[in-house]
Amino acid sequence: MTANAQIVIDQVSHRYRPPTGREVLALENVSLSVQNREFLALLGPSGCGKSTLLYMIGGFLPTVTGGIRIDGKPVAGPGPDRGVVFQHFALFPWKTVKANVLYGLERMPLPQDEREKRAQTFIEMVGLAGFEDSYPSQLSGGMKQRAAIARTLAFDPQILLMDEPFGALDAQTRGLMQAELLNIWRRTPKTVIFVTHDVQEAVFLAERVAVMSARPGQIKAVIDTKFDKTDPHVFKSKTFVDKVDEIWGLVRDEAIKAQASRAK
Ligand code: ADP
Ligand code: MG
């Protein structure tokens, strides 16, 4: 199983040591393998370390205890093989939407007009046509998030790391973006790790759902969610509803534990 895994997370722990205040053991002995081209959702209660784990895979936080390898190589920092959409993703405020998306394409060996075309395609895909020349400060939170998603998708990274990317979107846009993400993932060979706290979203998008425990985060269970989801009424199907129930049960237990430890 782990033999051809692309991303191997091996016994990773992470302790935050803020200059003031208490130390926090955010992750403890997390092991997880993600296969090439797999779509994995990471689910867990608030504060369980989902973002921390994603930052580490992205190379934005050093791995001190344990190891993370991608295609056999230890992660030593961010790289163009990994595209990230963070929860609080900052666009360059001094660049327009178009310039932000083009920035991600600078490394691509494409002529300028091809880059422009590509940027436009992704801007339209996320529903921002007409806002190419707007600055981030002129956009709503959801629009900024969509611009950030366009920027990341446009440069076609092999691995997509997404931290609650659709959390700020209205239900309709969210549905459209989910469908578009699945389309992209089916069309282009990408491995996706998608953090969400929405169980339905996880079951709909992912082939496997890793449920994390309350802090310190550990992988509590990995549930197979690979089944035919092409039926427009899949949300009402027994397979779908049963999976959501099963995973809800696991998440609920952890959310209760997380709340209890916060109350202490
Ligand atoms: P999640 O994304 O699952 O909500 P995080 O990975 O953001 O969880 O955080 C995990 C834990 O680590 C939380 O208890 C959070 O308060 C703590 N934490 C996150 N970032 C820092 C930091 N920079 N310094 C200290 N503690 C932090
Ligand atoms: Mg988070």
Image (cartoon, rainbow, N blue to C red):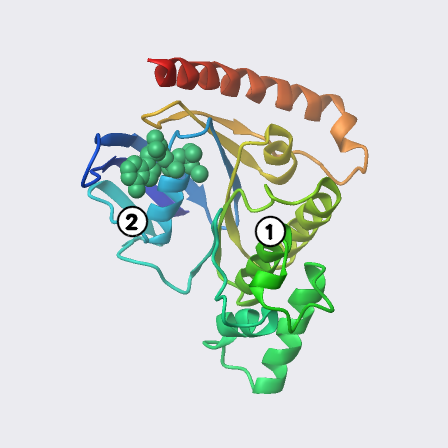
Secondary structure, mark 2, is loop
Nearest the viewer among 35 and 209 is 209
The amino acid marked with disc number 1 is Gly
Q: Quadrant of residue 65?
A: top left
Q: Looking at the image, which residue sits at the far front?
A: 137
Q: State if disc 1 and disc 2 touch (CB < 8 Å).
A: no
x and y percentages locating residue 135 in the rendered image:
58, 68
Q: Percent position (x, y) of residue 229?
A: 72, 37
Q: Is residue 99 visible?
A: yes
Q: Which mark is residue 61?
A: 2
Q: Quadrant of the C terminus?
A: top left
- What residue lies at 58% left-to-right and 72% top-to-bottom? 96
In which quarter of the view is residue 171 placed? top right
Q: Which residue is mark 1?
A: 141
Residue 118, placed above or below residue 126: below
**Residue at position x 67%, y 72% in the image:** 120
How packed is label 2: few (under 14 Cα within 10 Å), some, or many (20 or more)? some
Q: Nearer the viewer, mark 2 or mark 1?
A: 1
Label 1 Cα neighbours within 10 Å, binned few <14 / some 14-19 / many ≥20: some
Please, what secondary structure does the residue beneath circle 1 have?
A: helix
Left or right, 236 with reference to 123: right
In depth, the one of 86 and 71 nearer the eye is 86
Q: Name the residue at 81% across, 38% down.
A: 232
Amino acid type, mark 2: Leu
First in sequence, mark 2 or 1: give its number. 2
| Label 2 to label 1: alpha-carbon separation | 26 Å
- Rendering coords of residue 150 (x, y %): 60, 62
Q: Is residue 26 above or below residue 93?
A: above
Disc marking residue 212: none
Question: Which residue is at a point 40% across and 30% down the rendered structure image?
Answer: 47
**Residue 26 horizontal/vertical position (percent):** 30, 32
